[in-house]
Image (cartoon, grey):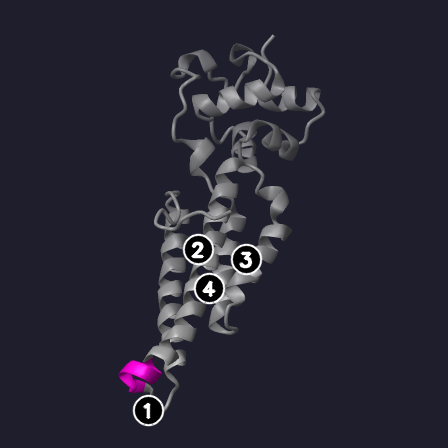
């Protein structure tokens, strides 16, 4: 007898969060499927069925659609499994703007928020996105720190520009890096809204 995803989930005494962790499907996607807002991609359905130890044919979607009418379930597709970002990723991304108030705070606040939101960032897609964001700020902090040290030294022995500036050269250097960081954060926010891959130019070090 066919059952809905919610019926199978409750039969196994699993919460939505627990099913998300077992299946590597985002919590938001599971909520959308159970509420009938989405039918889920074939690959998402396979992941959920494997986690629940049932055949796809046993699962009845909330809107009555048949799993058998969908495309090959064994073929991964870029849909809801890898396309939807958790809302908390937006907060982690924008939290780095605290660097505008306190130098290098972008390296601290996102890490704190990652810890706070860790229970909602369990699937691989969201974890990878957060790691990319944190990698960005690690790289930015290291490169900026090196530049702040190297710029005054190079100016002292080579350029002598600092002699005619009222504001120290290393502050100008930090402001330039800070503006670049803000632009990258805004670009990342746009990519999150468009559900695109984040920060493809940043080497992942986490």
Residue 162, quarter of picture: bottom left
| Cα distance between the residues tagged 3 and 1 | 37 Å
What residue span does the magenta drawing correspond to?
Answer: 155-161
N-terminal-most mark, 2 or 1: 2
Going by the picture, which residue comes out furthest to the front? 157
Q: Are marks 3 and 1 in contact (CB under 8 Å)?
A: no
Disc on res. 163: 1
| Cα distance between the residues tagged 3 and 4 | 13 Å
Query: How far across and how far down the image is residue 132, in percent?
Result: 45, 48
N-terminal-most mark, 2 or 4: 2
At 41% from the left and 24% from the top, the residue drawn is: 76
Query: How far across and how far down the image is residue 90, in percent?
Result: 48, 53
N-terminal-most mark, 3 or 1: 3
N-terminal-most mark, 3 or 4: 3
Residue occupied by mark 2: 136
Disc on res. 141: 4
Q: Name the main secondary structure of what is drawn in magenta.
A: helix
Residue 49 placement, left or right of 198 = right
Mark 2 secondary-structure assignment: helix
Going by the picture, which residue comes out furthest to the top? 1
At 45% from the left and 39% from the top, the residue drawn is: 84
Query: How far across and how far down the image is residue 178, in percent?
Result: 40, 69
Residue occupied by mark 3: 110
Circle 1 Cα neighbour tier, 10 Å, few/some/many (<14 / 14–19 / ≥20): few
Mark 3 secondary-structure assignment: helix
Point out the frontmost of discs 1 and 4: 1
Residue 70 visible here: yes
């Amino acid at each position: 007898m066919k059952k809905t995803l919610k019926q199978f989930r409750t039969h196994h005494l699993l919460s939505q969060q627990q099913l998300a962790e077992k299946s590597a499907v985002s919590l938001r996607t599971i909520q959308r499927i159970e509420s009938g807002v989405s039918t889920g991609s074939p690959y998402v359905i396979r992941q959920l069925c494997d986690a629940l130890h049932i055949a796809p044919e046993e699962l009845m979607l909330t809107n009555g659609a048949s799993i058998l009418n969908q495309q090959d379930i064994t073929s991964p597709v870029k849909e809801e499994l890898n396309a939807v970002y958790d809302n908390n990723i937006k907060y982690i991304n924008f939290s780095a703007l605290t660097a505008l108030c306190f130098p290098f705070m972008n390296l601290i606040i996102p890490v704190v928020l990652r810890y706070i939101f860790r229970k909602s960032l369990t699937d691989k897609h969201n974890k990878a996105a957060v790691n990319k964001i944190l990698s960005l700020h690690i790289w930015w902090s290291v490169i900026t720190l090196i530049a702040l040290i190297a710029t005054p030294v190079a100016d002292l022995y080579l350029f002598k520009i600092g002699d005619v500036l009222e504001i120290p050269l290393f502050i100008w250097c930090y402001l330039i890096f800070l503006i670049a960081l803000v632009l990258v954060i805004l670009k990342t926010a746009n990519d999150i809204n468009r559900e695109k891959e984040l920060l493809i130019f940043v080497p992942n070090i986490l």
